[in-house]
Image (cartoon, grey):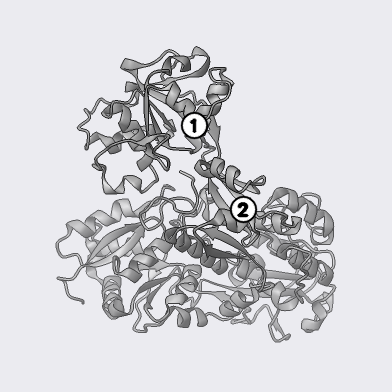
């Protein structure tokens, strides 16, 4: 038993997916005076890891890919306890190769020209235990991998596979870009030929997935199958014969083993989730978890021991241990896992550079790059820090950059920008950045023309809102040739929360009385813009009304706003004399643009697009569409270390 006077901090992530254990189990840790643990909250699992490294938290539970990511701090971190679903199983799962003996496979050299039944490509679902590293391990070991610079990494892999195996079935989405996916399937049809629906070859195919690959083998559509050992035991139920022939295990050394073998040969194993802590606290954390595992208080659902036990397990059990290992030692203990990571790095010199202008954004970009490698997402994203990304990309010194909508006009004037390869927006919420003219209902104008002579409040000079308003004046035939001086002439007075040109527009003069966390979600500027018409003497504020309730909540305490002061105190000024209390934006835009360097090849452009979409599907908001109950591994969009997203302007 550890010192009862010491409280260790477990890092947890709140979940929005209906399985938030923190809501139920963190309060008892704080309420119980005898508790040795309290919760520290983070935005995602990698944030937890950073909190452990800097001492803000003491320990947390991490999946295999996250532990692999943590090996870069191998000298500072320790693994104290595994979190197992089955106590007597050494690993989360083990991968095996099955063969139909009638196919004439006697060793590894006999695999060429045979038919493969593969579980297929999966959409990114971090935390579900199935990543590219493991799903594609067998083929990367057996099949000589091409590295044609004229082909994308994905196509190199598929071409290698297509030329090695005969008609096979590897269903699912091969490329995250749907158009490219269709092109590749038309180019390498033999990899879909033995699926139940070759023309579709998608995740709805009968032979897709873990059970599907085994069904493909037992239904005589293939000679080889890549499968989890636990699935094999269930599917064949100890019977090695089927309609085709006798089934055997194929070993990495080329030998065969019968299905009745109690401990068959394994190709690669995935480690269990485990507890990570700093070296300095590892022994005490391990002793505490060992104590909690067998504490009599576990029978009491109100005890801190019961609460901690439930935070540690996600349908799994912490295992008592007296061994402390480094993250690297832990990963090395799983057969084949390190080799899977090494084999997963195809064409190692292939990578794309993204220009980053701030240190915080660089840290986030590097975290995204590193965790993507742990999940087998390729090619590598190289993050380059520069104070002038516009010049870098114009000169072709970097491959891409993320451009905030507020900087588009400036970039067009100074660098010229080509059509973006992708847009940064929230596909999960179907949201865009909108610009609306907001006024207090008690002082609202009837239309845009009536704003003339008023005092206007802008978020920033020369940003998206500023230039959108100028364009709106032209579209509404209020001003034929709008420019920066138009703002001076149209409004009696105006100010901007941020202004890089005080001669054109002055900055609004406010005391900084907002809470420190008001910029956590990038809301500080627009909150101040709304404040301008509440207490700053302004008449109209140009903002995105999507978060107006949150702006009001941030301002409520500093401005002593009454509880009934809400969105109904404001009205939107619309064009063409349509004034309504609900939102009617004057313009909309994407939050940001992903720009590529000039004259980039179509192969590189497509590969960069696929890389970013793959990252988005795994770590972006679209990953919330899955039924994964685990907390997010990495938040591609959103705060980083408690600051507003420094990399992607998606709110």
SS assignment at label 2: helix
Q: Residue at x 48, y 19 (%)?
A: 574
* Residue 416 on image: x %, y %: 63, 46
Q: Which of the numbered marks, if any, corresponds to residue 613? A: 2
Q: Nearer the viewer, mark 2 or mark 1?
A: 1
* Residue 385 on image: x %, y %: 51, 63
Q: Residue at x 32, y 27 (%)?
A: 533
Q: Nearer the viewer, residue 146 or 329?
A: 146
Q: Is residue 279 visible?
A: yes
198 in relation to 547, above or below:
below
* Residue 491 on image: x %, y %: 41, 22
Which quadrant holds the C terminus? Answer: top left
Residue with the mark numbered 1: 484
> On the rendered structure, is 105 left or right of 297?
right
> On the rendered structure, is 143 left or right of 384?
right
Most extreme residue toward the front, as rendered?
503
Q: Residue at x 36, y 49 (%)?
A: 520
Which quadrant holds residue 296? bottom left
* Residue 255 on image: x %, y %: 72, 86
Q: Nearer the viewer, residue 286 or 278?
A: 278
Q: Nearer the viewer, residue 108 or 489?
A: 489
Q: Residue at x 85, y 73 (%)?
A: 113
Which quadrant holds the N terminus? Answer: bottom left
Which quadrant holds residue 275? bottom left
Mark 2 neighbour class, 10 Å CA radius: few under 14, some 14 to 19, many 20 or more: some
């Amino acid at each position: 038993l550890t010192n009862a006077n010491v409280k260790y901090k477990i890092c947890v992530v709140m979940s929005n997916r209906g399985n938030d254990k923190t809501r139920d189990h963190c309060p008892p840790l704080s309420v119980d005076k005898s508790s040795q643990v309290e919760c520290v909250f983070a935005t995602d699992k990698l944030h937890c890891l950073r909190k452990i490294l800097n001492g803000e938290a003491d320990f947390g539970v991490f999946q295999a890919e996250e532990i692999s990511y943590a090996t870069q701090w191998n000298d500072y971190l320790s693994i104290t306890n595994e979190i197992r679903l089955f106590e007597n199983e050494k690993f989360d799962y083990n991968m095996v190769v099955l063969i139909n003996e009638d196919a004439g496979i006697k060793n590894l050299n006999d695999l060429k020209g045979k038919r493969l039944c593969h579980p297929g490509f999966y959409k990114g679902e971090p935390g579900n235990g199935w990543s590219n590293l493991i799903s594609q391990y067998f083929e990367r070991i057996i099949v000589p991998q091409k590295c044609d610079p004229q082909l994308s990494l994905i196509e190199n892999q598929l071409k290698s596979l297509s030329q090695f195996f005969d008609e096979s079935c590897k269903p699912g989405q091969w490329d995250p870009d749907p158009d490219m996916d269709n092109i590749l399937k038309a180019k390498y049809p033999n990899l879909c030929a033995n699926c139940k629906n070759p023309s579709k070859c998608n995740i709805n195919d009968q032979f897709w997935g873990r059970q599907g690959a085994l069904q493909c083998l037992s239904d005589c559509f293939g000679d080889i199958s890549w499968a989890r050992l636990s699935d094999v035991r269930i599917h064949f139920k100890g019977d090695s014969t089927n309609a085709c022939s006798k089934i055997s295990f194929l070993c990495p050394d080329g030998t065969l083993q019968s299905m009745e073998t109690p401990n068959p040969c394994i190709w690669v194993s995935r480690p269990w989730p485990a507890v990570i802590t700093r070296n300095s606290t590892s022994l005490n954390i391990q002793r505490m978890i060992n104590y909690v595992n067998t504490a009599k208080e576990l029978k009491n659902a109100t005890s801190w021991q019961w609460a901690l036990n439930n935070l540690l397990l996600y349908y799994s059990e912490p295992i008592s241990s007296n061994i402390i290992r480094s993250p690297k030692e832990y990963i090395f203990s799983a057969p084949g896992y390190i080799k899977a990571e090494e084999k997963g790095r195809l064409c190692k010199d292939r990578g794309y550079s993204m220009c980053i202008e701030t240190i915080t954004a660089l840290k986030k970009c590097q975290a995204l790059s590193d965790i993507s490698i742990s999940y087998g997402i390729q090619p590598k994203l190289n993050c380059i820090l520069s104070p002038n990304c516009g010049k870098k990309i114009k000169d072709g010194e970097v491959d891409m950059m993320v451009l905030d909508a507020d900087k588009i006009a400036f970039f067009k004037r100074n660098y010229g920008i080509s059509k973006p390869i992708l847009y940064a927006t929230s596909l999960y919420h179907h949201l865009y950045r909108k610009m609306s003219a907001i006024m207090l209902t008690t002082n609202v104008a009837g239309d845009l023309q009536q704003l003339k002579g008023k005092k206007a409040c802008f978020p920033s000079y020369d940003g998206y809102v500023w230039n959108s308003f100028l364009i709106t004046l032209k579209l509404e035939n209020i001003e034929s040739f709008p420019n920066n001086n138009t703002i001076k002439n149209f409004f009696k007075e105006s100010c901007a929360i941020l202004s890089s040109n005080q001669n054109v527009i002055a900055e609004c003069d406010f005391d900084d009385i907002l809470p420190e966390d008001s910029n956590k979600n990038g809301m500080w500027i627009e909150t101040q813009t709304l404040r301008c018409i509440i207490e700053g003497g302004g008449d109209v504020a140009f903002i995105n009304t999507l978060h107006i309730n949150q702006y009001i909540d941030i301002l409520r305490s500093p401005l002593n706003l009454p509880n009934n002061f809400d969105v109904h105190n404001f009205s939107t000024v619309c064009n063409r004399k349509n004034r309504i209390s609900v939102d009617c934006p004057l313009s909309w835009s994407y939050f940001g643009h992903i720009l590529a360097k000039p004259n980039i090849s179509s192969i590189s452009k497509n590969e960069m697009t696929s890389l970013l979409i793959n990252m988005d599907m795994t770590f972006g908001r679209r990953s919330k569409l899955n039924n994964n109950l685990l907390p997010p591994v990495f938040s591609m969009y959103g705060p980083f270390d408690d600051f507003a997203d420094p990399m992607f302007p998606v709110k």
